[in-house]
Amino acid sequence: QVQLVESGGGLVQAGGSLRLSCASSGFTVFSMYSMGWFRQAPGREREFVAAIRRIGGGPYYAESVKGRFTISRDNAKNTVYLQVNVLKPEDTATYYCAARRGTEIVTMTSGYDYWGQGIQVTVSS
């Protein structure tokens, strides 16, 4: 049974930073899965934030977070991270990690096979 568990969220002032983690279990080989981060604010659709390929290749970011967020993975720990810097109030949302079997970068929610339960990030002004 595949599980993705996010952690590291919380309340932070504008301009601050957080490091979100997504620990996975149940994958036969974690490194065979490309990973993504999405977020959903109240009343809005879930939107793509960042993704990283399963093997090699560069990460990909939504324009709204480029230069402020960094996605990385540690295949030995079956974990993907999202370093979020220079946070803005509009970054306030529930953040979800997701996994898909494949090498392509996918920005649509329908392209992912597994999802975490989400973690709240609140940025105060």
Image (spheres, rainbow, N blue to C red):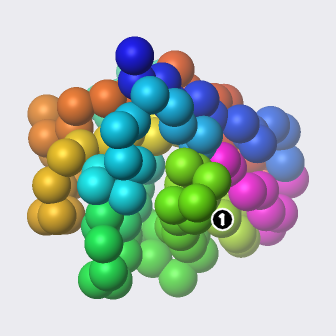
Residue under the point 24% across and 44% down: 100
Does 19 lie within the magenta span?
Answer: yes
Q: In this rendering, is residue 63 above or below 112?
A: below
Q: To which quarter of the image does residue 115 belong?
A: top left
Residue under the point 77% across and 56% down: 18
Residue under the point 30% across and 72% down: 55
Residue under the point 36% across and 47% down: 29
Nearest to the observer: residue 36 or residue 95: 36
SS type, badge 1: strand
Which residue is tagged 1?
A: 83
Residue 113 relative to residue 115: left or right = left
The number of discs equals 1
Q: In this rendering, is residue 111 above or below 85?
A: above
Q: Inspect the image, locate mark 1, and give the three-letter code of the amino acid beneath it.
A: Gln
Q: To which quarter of the image does residue 31 belong?
A: bottom left
Q: Residue 120: give x, y in percent of width and height.
A: 66, 30
Nearest to the observer: residue 23 or residue 8: 23
Q: Residue 122: give x, y in percent of width and height.
A: 72, 38
Which span is picked out in magenta?
13-21
Does 61 lie within the magenta span?
Answer: no
